[in-house]
Image (tube, grey):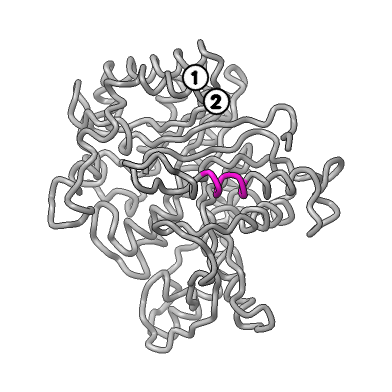
Amino acid sequence: MAFPAGFGWGASTAAYQVEGGWDADGKGPSVWDTFTHQGGERVFQNQTGDVACGSYTLWEEDLKCIKQLGLTHYRFSLSWSRLLPDGTTGFINQKGIDYYNKIIDDLLTNGVIPIVTLYHFDLPQALEDKGGWLSEAIIESFDKYARFCFSTFGDRVKQWITINEPNILAIMAYDLGVFPPGVPHFGTGGYQAAHNLIKAHARSWHSYDSLFRKEQKGMVSLGIFAGWAEPADTNSVSDQEAAKRAIAFCLDFFAKPIFIDGDYPEVVKSQIAFMSKKQGYPSSRLPEFTEEEKRMIKGTADFFAVQYYTSRLVKYQENKKEEVGFLQDVELQVFPDPSWKRLDWVYVVPWGIRKLLKYIKDTYNNPVIYITENGFPQGDPASLDDTQRWEYFRQTFQELFKAVKGDPWSSSCGAGKGSLRLWSLCYIHKGD
């Protein structure tokens, strides 16, 4: 099994998950610092990222691992509050710049391509205090931060992810309230946050395009989380429609505005409007983009970055109680096939990634695809037997190879004209 020339292999990390040094050398607090320090079992066993993997002081050890594995790419995120402690360029932390400069320079010296994520869930607390992603003011704040990073690191960084998994952030942080800031806004907050996340991404893409692209010659996108949704009963029309809604509310919610036409999927707009009307709202709980905003959002990605771990079966489930919430709006039930092997929340469904890639290819005009996260939880850390993990990877890579080389589900998915353009890299996520 040989992947095409130029296909890259990498590892992916996130600042809060690996760096530690939560208040070292002038770093400001992030929402995750505040959230985990409040206690109350908000996080498993009241754990924090204060130390984490200690990468802030142990970067050289990480670099040894990267070299030992022979990686071609390394994706990491910048801590916004390590660079700009209060979230603004009014105070710039040089120690933070030095830290990330060393990572970038060390990677390039060793022939490893850096892919840099601007934002991976760790908003500066100072900006959350002003409304966070629920406030439209965050759009300007993010754009200024992005410009600062492009200006500071863009001479060497050629591949950027603006926002990591905006769909997960919107739901978990601002609808359910299980991520920082920890305040639920069922049925409204997630949509408002998503609206601002999309506009913030688009603004920063335009900033790169107009101010930096000509000289730096880089690429910018955002990383969207997506699992595959398979109808529980393939003969049931309601289950088939529920599976389509699952993909639309997860993947297409962000991908369609950015890659196609600047607006949300029709099924998303109609479903939320329908549920809102049933619940007595005077208008849809989903904000609308203006025509000017649609033009600004459309086409603001240079590649398709997707993050896949697992899949689920989907069954239609009517919201009879008219409960308000993102999950209730979709009107479905998700569950695994009992035959699927699992560890924690990840079920081993190798064919799911293949179906997802084909869907992206067919729906989004065969874009260049980067799998910016993929992986399987670690089993017993005291055991050297990691059979489940390497078996997950083996089966996943086999499905990726089929998708690239010749997919029997679609004659247009094979090598040659119209082939799936998964030629660049595949990431194995580390640090969860």
Q: For label 2, count other residues whose C-alpha is less than 10 Å away and answer few (under 14), some (14-19) or many (20+).
A: some
Q: Main secondary structure of the magenta part?
A: helix
Side of 250 relative to 53 (left or right): right
- Per the image, the residue denoted by label 1 is 67
The magenta segment is 390-396
Is residue 430 shown in magenta?
no
Question: Can you say which quadrant of the picture contains the C terminus?
Answer: top left
Q: Quadrant of residue 303?
A: top right
Q: Residue at the location (28% across, 60% down)?
A: 177
Q: Amino acid at mark 2?
A: Leu
**Nearer to the camera, 101 or 89:** 101
Q: Quadrant of residue 287?
A: bottom left
The image position of residue 309, as x and y in percent, is 51, 52
Q: In this orientation, does residue 83 appear?
A: no
Element at label 2: loop
129, above or below 71, in the image:
below
- Per the image, the residue denoted by label 2 is 71
Q: For label 1, count other residues whose C-alpha is less than 10 Å away and answer few (under 14), some (14-19) or many (20+).
A: some
Q: In this orientation, does residue 90 appear?
A: yes
Estimate the spatial distance between the alpha carbons at disc 1 and disc 2, rounded to whole Å: 6 Å
Question: Can you say which quadrant of the picture contains the N terminus?
Answer: top right
The image position of residue 249, as x and y in percent, is 52, 64
74, above or below 265, in the image:
above
Q: Residue at the location (42% across, 18% down)?
A: 64
The image position of residue 240, as x and y in percent, is 64, 76
Q: Residue at the location (55% across, 35% down)?
A: 206
Contact between labelled residues 2 and 1, with CB atoms less than 8 Å apart = yes
Element at label 1: helix
Q: Amino acid at mark 1?
A: Lys
